[in-house]
Amino acid sequence: MRRLFPVTDTTVDPADREWDLAELAEAYAYPEPGPGEPVAWLRANMVSTLDGAAQHDGKSQPISNATDMRIFGTLRALADVVLVGAETVRQEGYRPARVRTEFAARREAAGQAPAPAIAVVSAGLDLDFSLPLFTSPVVPTLLLTGAAAARDRVAAAEKAGARVVVAGDGVGVEPARAVRALAELGHTRLLTEGGPRLLGQLVAAGVLDELCLTVSPMLTAGGAQRIAGGPSVAVPQRFELASLLEEAGFLFSRYRRS
């Protein structure tokens, strides 16, 4: 892997080599909030092909590679909580985040739990609560839903061990309220892995602070979803390039809100 941006005398590495996990953790460290800035920081991690597909046959794995997965694991290891949509949980077979011994000291020093919590955004709570995500996580799984969610499904989730967090007055979840609710629980380093519908909602609500986007050197054609779906925003939101890494034709970019 090599750094393409930012380019300075100290950051240019002429060798195309594999970065260790400590280097990746430094490259993707969460920013420290300045005076008057929001405490919570929400970043997204997504992968896209050259022609804009976020999935192939309904999953992101076919357009990823080993380095993308190492960055995926690093971003999880840095986060307090991983925010994910219910459809992605169903499609990708989500499991609890595991404890990574390589990051144990870093997480302890930052006052974090041994592993990030998974926070599932769901209006209908149409989920299989017998899955390990709910029955055997290191940190209890959170379910973000609306105040009008079906009582029997809330009860089923809580019986399975999940913690239900109300983040909307109706059936659905309000993105800004979800971010606030997670911050109130002490989760300020936020990561979302989509899917596209959830990311589109976060973008439309103006709560996304950073996008970590892997551009895969593949073409798929077809009708696969983009990384963000749903209605378009009235005015395109401008983000600035923070860093760009490259390996084997894959580009690993970080963009921050302007």
Image (spheres, grey):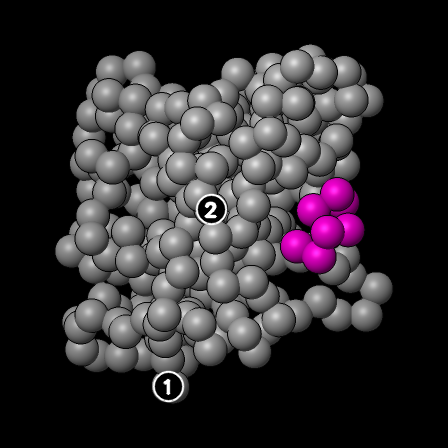
Q: Which residue is mark 2?
A: 137
The amino acid beneath tag 1 is: Asp
Q: Residues within 10 Å of mark 1 (few under 14, many from 20)?
A: few
Magenta stretch? 180-187
* Res 165 quadrant in image: top right
At x 24% / y 21%, what residue is drawn? 57
Q: Are marks 2 and 1 in contact (CB under 8 Å)?
A: no
Main secondary structure of the magenta stretch? helix
**Residue 240 horizontal/vertical position (percent):** 54, 54
Look at the numbered disc 2 and give the secondary structure of its residue. loop
**Residue 238 horizontal/vertical position (percent):** 60, 44
Q: Which residue is mark 1?
A: 9
Front position in the image: 234 or 247: 247
**Residue 98 horizontal/vertical position (percent):** 39, 54
Look at the numbered disc 1 and give the secondary structure of its residue. loop
Front position in the image: 150 or 3: 150
Front position in the image: 143 or 85: 143
The amino acid beneath tag 2 is: Pro
* Res 181 quadrant in image: top right
Residue 62 badge: none
Q: Is residue 83 left or right of residue 105?
A: right
Q: Is residue 145 left or right of residue 195?
A: right
- Residue lying at the far bottom in this picture: please name it: 10
* Residue 228 lies in the magenta stretch: no
Q: State which quarter of the image contains the N terminus.
A: bottom left
At x 31% / y 44%, what residue is drawn? 215
Q: CA distance from mark 2 to mark 1?
A: 44 Å
